[in-house]
């Protein structure tokens, strides 16, 4: 291993080890056997070979932003892709290739030089890898689908050392599994995305309303979004303003000409009497960083999340009750309107199955003091239990913590059994188990034709 990686192998006792083993969520405290910083496919192959030789599990770190801490593992090997963060844009064909260690801020900066974008995460230091492999929600979901819907092909290093191209034409079943099935099937070292014309400026921003008017604001928001075009993304968040006042905050973006979006922004303003209105034309790259402020690495985080088939009056009232006493300044309850282009993809067309839900609900707390763990985790769990009558038996794998196999099954829904069979083909020993894990079906599938 030392011969292959040299200084790029970080072991216990190395002065860099403490920093190298840390991931975004400060609640995660794991000690790997080694962190191997990979610069290409050969490095990844060597890391997988070493893990097999010493018989330990593998964690793959793209951005390390998983709330469950899946970018690090106790006693195993971390394949750190952060050195693989190049982005190459082909503007004439509206395509971009990006290495597996790329973060969305880096990706957006490269594509926006050409007035192009694809659906990416809401936090700029989220990795493209984990977000895309788990589905990928963002401001462009309603207009252009999920991140995985825009994945044209991928380059994958398999646990047996093969390097495969996964696309509709080559290794199509693997390609299908990568679009929403998580990091269960191999280490993806290159992603190729379809891009769309956007920006560089977009109509976007936030509108804050008084907490006392929340019920009426949410009902009007629901009515506006029922007829909104795909271009309009609008999320409602119970949270705390910079001055400490509790409020309901609408964050919105119009993925089209500003003149077409102005009327829709006015309709959103009329959901209530704004305390603050920061909607304006601004660079898309700036907006993509606008939520970064409270989400820096090392803070403690706990999330609960699911889908809603609709936003009933009863669900609104319960959400108001849950958000009445937020346990931390950066604790939020967030309701995101789904639908649009993402909902017009059949549930079995990609591994990500949840296409007909109308909303996502996210109960999230971020804090710093370990002594506040109980209050923050307790609030999220209690709120989750209170919202249970209104949520669907579905989950979004990128927002899952370590919540057990039943929740993993909910994440993959009708596609779970097919994914388990594909897992048996590409990772029969479940070496890649540090994820929302799909346990391989006994006996590898034999009816999948594979192009090497």
Image (tube, rainbow, N blue to C red):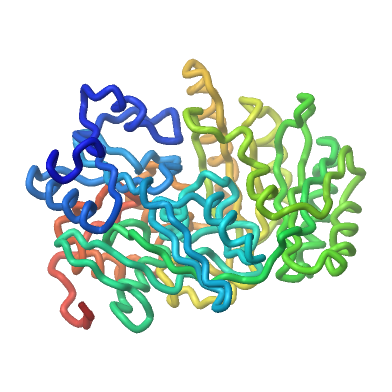
Q: Quadrant of residue 420?
A: bottom left
Total numbered labels: 0
Residue located 78% across and 46% down the image:
206
Task: Single out the residue that lies furthest toward the top.
Answer: 371
Of 155 and 213, the residue lying toward us: 155
Of residues 282 and 311, the one drawn nearer to the viewer in this rendering:
282
Left/right placement of residue 79 relative to residue 97 reads left
The residue located at (66%, 26%) in the rendering is 329
x, y percentage for residue 149? 50, 70
Quadrant assignment for the N terminus: top left
| Image: 167 above or below 245 | below
Is 386 positioned to the left or the right of 286 in the image?
left
Residue 91 sits above or below residue 360 on the image: below
Q: Is residue 45 left or right of residue 267?
A: left
Place of residue 429 in the rendered image (x, y in percent of width and height, measured from the top left): 14, 56
* On screen, residue 443 above or below 282: below
Q: Is residue 212 left or right of residue 321?
A: right
Q: Residue 73 appears at what percent x and percent y?
A: 27, 38
Residue drawn 60% across the image and 57% down it? 138
| Observer-nearest of 221 and 72 | 72
Which of the image's four quarters has the C terminus? bottom left
Q: Position of residue 239 (x, y in %)?
A: 70, 35
Residue occupying image coordinates x 54% and y 27%: 376
């Amino acid at each position: 291993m030392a011969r292959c990686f040299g200084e790029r192998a970080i072991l216990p006792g190395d002065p860099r080890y403490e920093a190298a083993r840390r991931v975004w969520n400060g609640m995660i405290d794991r000690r790997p056997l080694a962190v191997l910083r990979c610069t290409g496919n050969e490095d990844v192959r060597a890391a997988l070979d070493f893990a097999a030789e010493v018989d330990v599990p593998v964690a793959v770190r793209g951005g390390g932003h998983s709330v469950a801490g899946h970018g690090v593992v106790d006693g195993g090997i971390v394949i750190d892709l952060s050195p693989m963060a190049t982005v190459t844009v082909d503007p004439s064909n509206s395509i971009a290739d990006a290495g597996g260690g790329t973060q969305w801020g880096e990706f957006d900066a490269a594509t926006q030089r050409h007035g192009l974008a694809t659906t990416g995460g809401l936090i700029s230091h989220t990795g493209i890898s984990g977000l895309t492999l788990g589905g990928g929600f963002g401001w462009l979901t309603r207009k252009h689908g999920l991140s995985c819907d825009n994945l044209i092909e991928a380059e994958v290093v398999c646990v047996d050392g093969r390097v495969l191209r996964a696309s509709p034409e080559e290794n199509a079943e693997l390609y299908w599994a990568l679009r929403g099935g998580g990091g269960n099937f191999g280490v993806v070292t290159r992603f190729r995305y379809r891009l769309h014309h956007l920006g560089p400026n977009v109509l976007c921003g936030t509108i804050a309303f008084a907490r006392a008017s929340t019920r009426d604001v949410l009902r009007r928001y629901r009515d506006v979004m029922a007829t909104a075009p795909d271009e309009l993304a609008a999320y409602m968040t119970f949270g705390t303003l910079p001055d400490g006042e509790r409020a309901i905050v609408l964050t919105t973006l119009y993925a089209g000409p500003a003149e077409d979006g102005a009327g829709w922004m006015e309709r959103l303003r009329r959901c209530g009497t704004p305390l603050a209105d920061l909607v304006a034309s601004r660079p898309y790259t700036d907006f993509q960083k606008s939520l970064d402020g409270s989400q820096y690495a090392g803070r403690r985080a706990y999330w609960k999340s699911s889908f809603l088939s609709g936003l009933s009056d009863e669900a609104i009232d319960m959400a108001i009750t849950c958000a009445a006493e937020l346990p931390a300044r950066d604790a939020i309850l967030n309701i995101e309107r789904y639908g649009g282009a993402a909902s017009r993809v059949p549930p079995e067309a990609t591994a990500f199955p949840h296409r007909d839900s109308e909303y996502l609900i996210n109960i999230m707390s971020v804090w710093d003091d370990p002594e506040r763990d109980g209050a923050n985790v307790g609030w999220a769990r209690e709120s989750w239990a209170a919202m249970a009558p209104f949520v669907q038996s579905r989950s979004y794998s990128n927002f899952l913590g370590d919540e057990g196999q039943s929740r993993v099954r909910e994440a993959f829904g009708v596609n779970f059994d097919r994914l388990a069979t594909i897992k048996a083909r590409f990772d029969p020993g479940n070496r890649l188990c540090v994820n929302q894990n799909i346990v391989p079906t006994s006996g590898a599938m034999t009816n999948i034709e594979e192009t090497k």
